[in-house]
């Protein structure tokens, strides 16, 4: 049996496709937990599936860059409702989670081409600088999520006056 090459979106999003017999084996409870955590899935990069749940989660592609005062993260989230996006921000890390639901219910054998990614996705990125969490801002414009994260200025100094009481 010839191995099917991953689509461009599977490679970009980091998703992998299970062979039908592997998927049936997992769904029917035939794989023990130790097998599930070390199940090797064939993909171009020979990714390892370490999830213990059967629903695969795609990896969101992002661009991250900095200006003098902030770190900017951009991600394409077209087709995702704002209510289906979750952002978790700490001083040195950002996690974006979401779910893209298909708007049509067609059986797989009805497709001629099926390349779009549907389902859950997430991405966690480590930030190159600490940020001021309270001033973080997120907007979505035409399917592009833009996170603006103001950098924490560790060299900032303030002079205070001593008051006599």
Image (spheres, grey):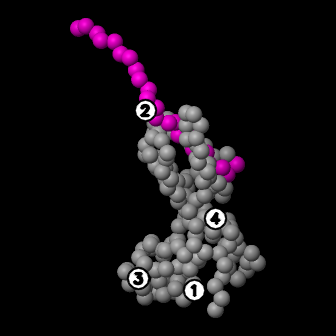
Q: Which residue is mark 3?
A: 35
Label 3 and label 4: CA atoms lie apart by 27 Å
Q: Are marks 2 and 3 in contact (CB under 8 Å)?
A: no
Task: Please give left or right for residue 99 compared with residue 131 in the image.
Answer: right
Assign the C terminus to one quadrant of the image.
top left
The residue depicted at 61 percent of the width and 51 percent of the height is 63
Q: Residue furthest front?
A: 155
Mark 4 burial class by Cα count in 10 Å: few <14, some 14-19, many 20+: few
Q: Which residue is mark 2?
A: 154
Q: Which residue is mark 4?
A: 12
Task: Please give left or right for residue 145 compared with residue 39 in the image.
Answer: right
Of the image marks 1 and 2, the number of the one nearer the N terminus: 1
Q: Are marks 1 and 3 in contact (CB under 8 Å)?
A: no
The residue depicted at 60 percent of the width and 54 percent of the height is 62
Q: Position of residue 106 (x, y in %)?
A: 69, 75
Q: Judge depth for marks 1 and 2 and give the one in front.
A: 2
Q: Nearer the viewer, residue 138 or 109?
A: 138
Task: Please give left or right for residue 74 compared with residue 158 in the image.
Answer: right
Of the image marks 4 and 1, the number of the one nearer the N terminus: 4
Q: Is residue 119 visible in this depiction of the protein?
A: no
Q: What residue range appears in magenta?
A: 142-165
Identify the mark at residue 20; answer none if there is no mark.
1
Label 1 and label 3: CA atoms lie apart by 17 Å
Does the magenta portion include 121? no
Q: Position of residue 61 (x, y in %)?
A: 60, 58
Q: Judge depth for marks 4 and 2 and give the one in front.
A: 2
Magenta span: chief secondary structure: loop
Element under disc 4: helix
Q: Are marks 3 and 4 in contact (CB under 8 Å)?
A: no
């Amino acid at each position: 049996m010839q191995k099917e090459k991953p689509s461009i979106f599977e490679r970009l999003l980091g998703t992998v496709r299970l062979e039908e017999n592997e998927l049936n084996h997992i769904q029917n409870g035939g794989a023990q937990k130790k097998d599930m955590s070390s199940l090797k899935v064939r993909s171009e990069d020979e990714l390892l599936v370490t999830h213990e749940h059967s629903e695969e989660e795609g990896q969101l592609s992002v661009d991250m860059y900095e200006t003098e005062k902030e770190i900017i993260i951009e991600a394409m989230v077209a087709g995702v409702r704002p209510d289906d996006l979750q952002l978790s921000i700490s001083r040195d890390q950002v996690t974006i989670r979401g779910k893209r639901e298909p708007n049509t219910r067609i059986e797989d054998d009805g497709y001629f081409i099926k390349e779009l990614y549907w389902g859950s996705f997430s991405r966690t990125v480590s930030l190159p600088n600490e940020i001021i969490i309270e001033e973080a801002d997120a907007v979505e414009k035409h399917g592009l999520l833009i996170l603006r994260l103001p950098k924490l200025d560790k060299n900032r100094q303030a002079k205070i006056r001593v008051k006599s009481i």
